[in-house]
Image (cartoon, helix red, strand yellow):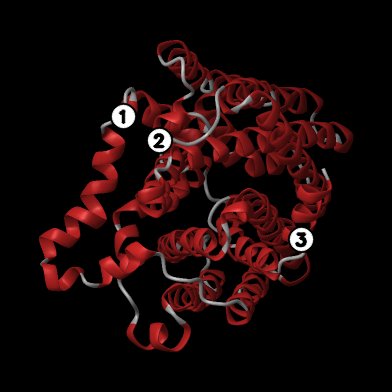
Amino acid sequence: MSGPGRGLAAIWREPRLASVLGLGFASGLPLPLTFGTLSFWLAESGVSRTAIGLFALVGTAYSLKFLWAPLVDSLPLPFLTRTFGRRRGWTLATQVALLIAIAALGLTDPAVDPAATAIAALAVAFLSATQDIVIDAYRIELLRPEEQGIGAAAIQWGYRGGMLAASAGALYAAAFGGWTVAYAVMACLMLVGVATVLLSPEPERPAEAGTRQGAPAEGVLAWVHRAVVAPFAEFAGRPGWLAILLFVVLYKLGDALAGVMANPFYVALGFTKIEVANVAKLFGVAATLAGLAVAGLIVYRWGVYRSLLVCGLLQAASNLTYVLQAWAGHDVWVLTLTILLENFTGGMGSAAFVAYLSGLCSLAFTATQYALLSSLAAVGRTTLSASGGWLADRLDWIPFFLATTAAAIPALLILLWLGRRFPIAPEQQAGRGRPA
């Protein structure tokens, strides 16, 4: 109809959508610098595969961010809050700190002092996780209700753009100037996020924010109960909540196990930085964006439950393309096919998964519950995937990638059980979402 069509076009023209895109870029930029890009640097420096896998533990900050999310959500930063507002103040503080930490990480030498590299990477991961907390809240409060769906797409496109800059862009910079220069360039790119915040308005304070501000007068225990205990207690009161949490942890595990060793795998097969940047990063990101778009249509037509199942199956099967790559060896055309399929299905799985996590959040506790769920989702990507290097050392490449495919099966079995045990889709238990 023309009315809704005009409304949709008007939403896409909103400057707030450009703000969300810039925030997504700033959110996605730090992740590869402590994960994929860092693993390439470590592999080139002669660090063992087992040690590279253990470096994934620096991402534990993403798994634990729910612990300090209530503080970020409710406590003001005195000078910055007065000058820029509560959300913008926190965002600027974390972005400036990230700029410094990323540059410091580039000054370390993993071949000489891997402990210093690990400490700097941990600092980047902690600050990045903190930035994610405030950006999630900023995005939700900045957009109107009818803009939230499009805003979710915009944040993911911006996020993928940041990841592209910190993966392909960093590899190009490292090929011509070395890793210190590459990380310095990435640090400067954090200024995109700073500029976005400076040019964006402070969102209107939700009604409950005023209540939180008065919490100290009520007493610390009352504040803790309302800001910390209540969101978790509400979630724990839902049917099947333990199975839901286990599913959240395991859904991306197979994908993450393969991802943590992908760059060392390319190095072992003799691919150069430029080859990986051209194929695995540039074409791969395009495939991911296409997968996100296709999954968005699937979720709309089929609902979240069936979309999770189909996308999860395709995501698991795509790990078998690494087996094909191992057989083919140093073949750029096979690399292109491998990365296109893996990233396309990975994008599909991510879109369905984000829709699922968003539907699980109660509107009364969106920020804290989303931090909890996304933290649990990061457990599979970081803590559990840290065993990837150890497995690759003992299984070799082909058995390793077969094992990563099998690692996706438990989550799909849990999803099938949830679908049969609860006729209403799990996301509707929070009073949101649509029938599966």
Q: Residue at x 58, y 32 (%)?
A: 255
Q: Residue 348: image x %, image y %?
A: 68, 34
**Relative to 172, is 297 above or below?**
above
Q: Residue furthest top?
A: 420
Q: Indicate which disc, 1 or 2, sits on the residue closer to the N terminus.
A: 1
Q: Amino acid at mark 1?
A: Arg
Q: Which amino acid, mark 3? A: Ala
On residue 10, the disc is 3
* First of labels 3, 2 by sequence position: 3
Residue identified by numbered label 1: 238
Residue 358 visible (yes or no): yes
Kindly tell me whether residue 44 is visible in this rendering: no
Apparent side of residue 246 relative to residue 261 in the rendered image (left or right) = left
- Please tell me whether residue 319 is drawn above or below residue 376 in the rendered image: above
- Residue 48 vertical position relative to residue 181 in the rendered view, above or below: above
Q: Quadrant of residue 378?
A: top left
Report how far apart the C-alphas of labels 3 and 2 lie in the structure: 30 Å
Q: CA distance from mark 1 to mark 3?
A: 38 Å
Residue 63 location in percent, x, y? Answer: 39, 47
Residue denoted by label 2: 430
Labels 1 and 3: the sequence-earlier one: 3
What's the residue type where badge 2 is placed? Ala
- For mark 1, give the secondary structure: loop
